[in-house]
Amino acid sequence: MIHRFLKPRIDDFRSQMIWLTVYSDLITNLVLVFLALYGLTLMGDEALAKAIQSMKLEDIKYIDRLDERLKFSDVALVLRQELHTLPDVSVSEDPGVTRIEFGERVLFESGRADLKAAARPILARVANLLRLVPYTIVVEGHSDNIPIQGGGRYHDNGELSLARAMSVVNLLSGAEQIPPKQLAAAAYGPFRPRSSNLTAEGRRMNRRIEIGLFKDFPFSFDESNTTVKTEVAAPHAF
């Protein structure tokens, strides 16, 4: 077999020039892309915006029928698309659960558990999406570890976080007509911090409300619960 390696190889001209074919295809594709973009600019800004939107890899066609239920794999993407304009509201994903997180001042004033007036249109916008989610919805209350001053309405941070979670549940099941049996409240107080409680910024991140949607706990809608609101009040800026 050694003589095969020592024997001079006769180079094929076609194999030497194969890179030129690949390079030519690349240049041709680039020219076509730039020609397409140039054509779109001649058609106006509206056409360009539509083209950019259509090229988003993560984009999905939004639900045309409002009675269609969301698949769990689409929940986070749709929530991000619809809620990204709300200040201090974010969407996160963990295995089997998607969460909507509200910062400390989005829904409540410091030390209070009654919803702010500006919180109601925000939760109405969220509820309009939650009606499409066939999963159990758990509202979770979280706090920092700074003890509550004595003499107040709440004995500790656990009670305050539970009262806040229940305020959200009551609004969703009442005014927003989310089925009560689809909703639950949980109070974690300071025991599931998002950041260190040693800094003011860390404590601010720990004071939050989260709405969790759990894949392993599907919910079957009754036939009478298929109505979805088509108009939502615009959120207040704060």
Image: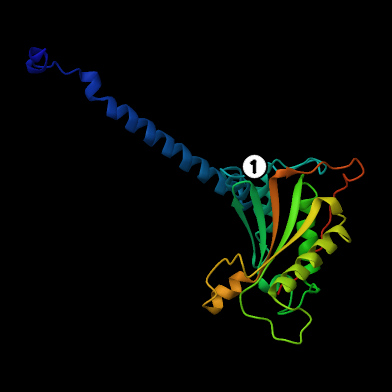
Give the image's coloring scheme.
rainbow
Left or right of residue 167, residue 19 in this image? left
Whether 200 is drawn above or below 39: the answer is below
**Residue at the spot x=79%, y=81% of the render?**
153
Image quadrant for the N terminus? top left
Left or right of residue 203, residue 171 in this image? right
Along the viewing direction, whichever of 39 and 187 lies nearer the viewer: 187
Look at the image and tell me whether residue 106 can be seen.
Answer: yes
Image quadrant for the C terminus? bottom right
**Residue at the spot x=20%, y=17% of the render?**
12
Left or right of residue 38, residue 185 in this image? right
Whether 75 is drawn above or below 163: the answer is above
Secondary structure found at label 1: helix
Q: Report the residue marked by disc 1.
A: 73
- Residue 144 falls in image quadrant: bottom right
Q: Position of residue 182 (x, y in %)?
A: 81, 50
Considering every residue shown, the one lying at the far right of the view is: 224
Look at the image and tell me whether residue 234 can be seen.
Answer: no
Q: Position of residue 7 (x, y in %)?
A: 8, 14
**Residue at the spot x=82%, y=63% of the render?**
233
Q: Position of residue 51 (x, y in %)?
A: 59, 44
**Residue at the spot x=66%, y=62% of the render?**
101
Q: Position of residue 19 (x, y in %)?
A: 28, 29
